[in-house]
Image: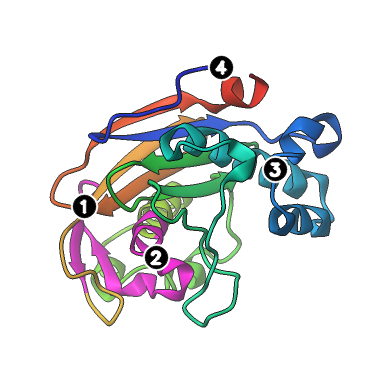
Amino acid sequence: MPDVAAPTSRCTVWWAAPVDPGSAPRLVGLLDEHERGRLARFRRPADRGRYLAAHALARLVLAPLAGSAADALAFDRTCRCGAPHGKPVLPGGPGFSLSHAGDLVGVAVRPDGPVGLDVEQLRDIADLDALAAHVRSPAERSRPGLDPAGFFRTWTRKEALVKATGDGLSAAMTAITLAPDRPAVERWTGPAAPSGPMWLHDLSPAADHPAAVAGPGERAPEIVEADGDAVLRA
């Protein structure tokens, strides 16, 4: 099995393809009762494949860092409302984030702090301006030009940021203004705004699949991309 441990100065992003649950009983066996229940409720095979790959991969790469067997990891999914449907957290373990799009799943792991990861599949959008109005801040809407590639790059950056703060899509993306010429936060307003700076880093794991990873701090750690398929096969 590949060495999945990462030094604390790194953020490692593992990329893998979806896995058919029917062909991978070993990976299904790594999941806990909650995860197996979620897996069974997906109707589309593509959704089941992405869910299994992402959650099995997360367990396999987190286990060595947590000093535990992959199938023994116990996640806390308590939402801010108190229900068990929030972002999974590994108590006492490293920060991590899951994302998937198309035929790609990703798991980001940062041993020394929170992290957010997002990947999207570039595609045509029937009403790009209407959707962009829910994503771009007033300052960003005043900038000229918007195409699908630019929109999805903006989306991945902002979703990575709100995942890193723990708010996810409950936070207003329009409160975030990104720098026009680089992956950086120019301004963040509103109650969900973090108290300190956030780093942001662009990734391109596959053709037409923009991605971004983010976390709290002045500067990004070393970002390393790794082969998640090899981990799932081992």
From what the image shows, is residue 141 above or below residue 24?
below
Q: Is label 4 or label 1 in front?
A: 4
Task: Report the side of 221 relative to 39 (left or right).
Answer: left
Q: Position of residue 77 (x, y in %)?
A: 55, 65
Q: Residue at x 75, y 39 (%)?
A: 29
**Amino acid residing under circle 2:** Gly
Q: Quadrant of the N terminus?
A: top right
Numbered badge on residue 184: 1
Report the residue marked by disc 3.
52
What whole-number distance in Å separates the C-alpha atoms at marks 4 and 3? 19 Å
Numbered badge on residue 166: 2
Q: Earlier in the sequence, mark 4 or mark 1?
A: 4
Q: Is residue 105 in view?
A: no
Q: Is label 2 or label 1 in front?
A: 2
Q: Quadrant of the C terminus?
A: top right
Task: Report the side of 83 relative to 12 (left or right).
Answer: right
- Mark 3 and mark 1 residues within 8 Å of each other at the beta carbon: no
Q: Position of residue 187 (x, y in %)?
A: 18, 67
What whole-number distance in Å separates the C-alpha atoms at marks 3 and 1? 32 Å
Report the residue marked by disc 4.
1
Q: Earlier in the sequence, mark 2 or mark 4?
A: 4
Q: Which residues are magenta?
A: 159-188
Of residues 175 and 11, the one drawn nearer to the viewer in this rendering? 11
Q: Residues within 10 Å of mark 4 (few under 14, many from 20)?
A: few
